[in-house]
């Protein structure tokens, strides 16, 4: 039975590369994303061979502890289809315990597990070079991979129980792949740069000691603890974790084999795209429609592409006039945050006559304002999450990361809040649907609202900018003031903008429709 299931697994993997072209492309994209993640992770781990011992331990344990959490959430909520779902083997009459072991063994033959094996082998190289035995290093990798594999299988099984009719779609799968890629790049850059900043790893030493005795970080801490002492604690935790997860997995297999699914109705299932992912509320419906527009309309896509390019180009003049590279590297990311927050300041005008759907459905203004911000948030957060670690790596001081987060959060959230008001107060004509993104109509206004949003976001962010400047020039303790202050100020402006813009939207609904018809 085990050999047959394994052959079936290999045939399914090969069969996924044939058939419908779109399905093949999606599969290849997933494989490429996983390979990129594995490559970035291996590169970062191998760079730690020259780092101090505490730095290597901090980076390794923190990164490894995040992997099982991400895999579990992705399996539970990511919309992935488990080809080895236990319910598909009901007709064979296999007992739950043997079937659970067989399915777990067959699941090893997958691209994600192979990627984990590659990263684990990099860890073996890292710790054997530092004095750990090969046996202990390989044991740590095996326990870590088993933990990740069991959590992924449990997540898929729980998804089958909690969502009898899974709302799978390309959008949900793609969103989780992007999330994993962003996390891998950010963690990889962080890991590769920690060797130059041992101060941060010392500050995180307490968190590492705690994670070493938790199910998430126990296996990763085994090689280091075998060198420095305290090997028994992480080993016991790692073994108990695998045992407990195995018991849960066997119970879930037994439950799935003896549970009957409720019948599917024709109204459930996929095919709704973003509408199947967002919540069934007015703001969720607006968010889904806005996501479709932003990701397909060239007028929106041009704006999204220009923002990172414009931010990076600004570094060149600074470097040419003599600004140090480590200082100039901090400029593009806050600029991107500012421009991303500014982009939706005229989103109603891009709707054109489609605005009537919101008005005819009597959508509350605050729901409209909040829903329209979803596309820019979905695009901006991954871009900023990848850009910030790279900028800090070029700067050379990871202690300034909280300050960078606070400044970017304040600029981005303040810009979104002011844009929510500006688009309802003073929309101005733009190119109509179907026109070229570079074709702009003649207009007499628009500059005022653009300037107000940009300058307003900067003004509201002045406290965060000042704290960041003080942190950069003298006192590093201000970095945390910058982060929490920036998040607080930005969130307050965002909420005020959503509700204030919603009031304006409700009161000016007829005028906004007239504008959409005439522009």
Image (spheres, rainbow, N blue to C red):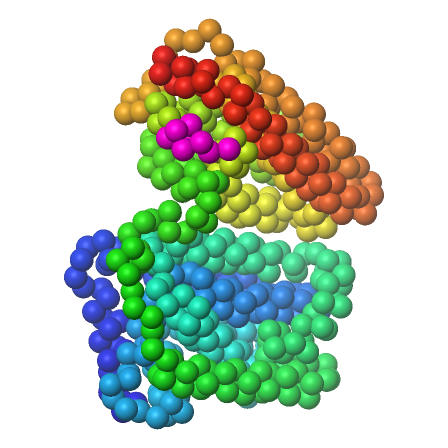
**Residue depicted at x 45% and y 62%:** 77
Q: Residue furthest left?
A: 19
- Residue 318: quadrant of the picture: top right
Closest to the observer, 429 or 356: 356
Closest to the observer, 143 or 473: 143
87 left or right of 142? left
470 left or right of 442? right
Which quadrant is home to the N terminus?
bottom left
**Residue 120 horizontal/vertical position (percent):** 50, 74
Does the magenta-highlighted stretch encompass residue 150?
A: no
Closest to the observer, 285 or 207: 285
**Residue 240 horizontal/vertical position (percent):** 59, 87
**Residue depicted at x 41% and y 83%:** 255
Task: Specify the segment rendered in magenta.
Answer: 357-364
**Residue 22 horizontal/vertical position (percent):** 23, 53
**Residue depicted at x 37% and y 51%:** 276
Residue 277, visible in the rendered structure: yes
**Residue depicted at x 46% and y 45%:** 281
Number of numbered discs overlaid on the protein picture: 0
Which quadrant is home to the C terminus?
top left
Q: Is residue 194 above or below residue 155?
A: above
Q: Is residue 438 above or below residue 294?
A: above
Does the magenta-highlighted stretch encompass residue 363?
A: yes
């Amino acid at each position: 039975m085990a050999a047959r299931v394994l052959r079936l697994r290999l045939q399914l993997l090969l069969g996924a590369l044939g058939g419908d072209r779109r399905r093949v492309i999606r599969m290849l994209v997933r494989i490429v994303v996983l390979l990129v993640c594995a490559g970035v992770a291996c590169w970062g781990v191998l760079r730690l061979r020259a780092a101090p011992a505490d730095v290597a331990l901090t980076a390794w344990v923190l990164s490894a502890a995040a992997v099982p959490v991400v895999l579990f959430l992705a399996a539970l909520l990511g919309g992935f289809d488990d080809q080895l779902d236990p319910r598909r083997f009901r007709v064979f009459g296999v007992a739950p315990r043997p079937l659970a072991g067989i399915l777990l063994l067959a699941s090893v033959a997958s691209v994600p597990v192979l990627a984990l094996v590659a990263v684990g082998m990099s860890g073996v190289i890292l710790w054997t070079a530092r004095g750990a035995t090969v046996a202990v290093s390989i044991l740590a990798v095996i326990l870590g991979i088993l933990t990740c594999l069991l959590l992924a299988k449990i997540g898929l099984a729980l998804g089958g129980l909690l969502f009898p009719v899974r709302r799978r779609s390309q959008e949900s799968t793609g969103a989780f792949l992007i999330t994993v890629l962003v996390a891998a790049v950010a963690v990889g850059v962080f890991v590769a740069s920690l060797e130059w900043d041992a101060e941060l790893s010392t500050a995180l030493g307490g968190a590492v000691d705690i994670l070493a005795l938790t199910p998430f970080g126990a296996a990763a801490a085994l090689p280091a603890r075998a060198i420095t002492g305290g090997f028994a604690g992480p080993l016991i935790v790692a073994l108990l974790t695998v045992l407990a997860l195995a018991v849960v997995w066997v119970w879930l297999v037994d439950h799935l084999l003896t549970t009957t699914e409720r019948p599917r109705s024709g109204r459930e299932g996929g095919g709704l795209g973003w509408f199947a992912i967002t919540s069934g509320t007015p703001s969720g419906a607006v968010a889904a429609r806005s996501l479709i527009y932003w990701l397909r309309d060239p007028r929106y896509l041009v704006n999204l592409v220009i923002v990172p390019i414009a931010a990076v180009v600004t570094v060149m003049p600074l470097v040419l006039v003599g600004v140090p590279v480590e200082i100039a590297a901090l400029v593009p990311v806050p600029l991107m945050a500012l421009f991303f927050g500014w982009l939706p300041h005229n989103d109603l005008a891009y709707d054109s006559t489609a605005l009537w759907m919101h008005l005819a459905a009597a959508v509350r203004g605050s729901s409209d304002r909040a829903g329209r911000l979803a596309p820019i948030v979905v695009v901006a957060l991954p871009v900023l999450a990848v850009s910030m670690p790279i900028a800090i790596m070029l700067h050379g001081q990871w202690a300034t990361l909280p300050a960078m987060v606070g400044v970017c959060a304040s600029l981005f959230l303040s810009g979104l809040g002011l844009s929510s008001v500006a688009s309802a107060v003073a929309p101005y004509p733009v190119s109509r649907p179907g026109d070229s993104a570079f074709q702009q109509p003649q207009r007499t206004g628009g500059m005022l609202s653009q300037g107000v949003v940009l300058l307003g976001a900067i003004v509201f962010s002045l406290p965060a900018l000042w704290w960041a400047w003080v942190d950069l020039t003298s006192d590093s303790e201000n970095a945390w003031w910058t982060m929490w202050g920036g998040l607080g100020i930005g969130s307050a402006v965002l909420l005020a903008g959503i509700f204030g813009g919603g009031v304006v939207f409700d009161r000016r609904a007829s005028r906004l429709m007239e504008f959409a018809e005439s522009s």
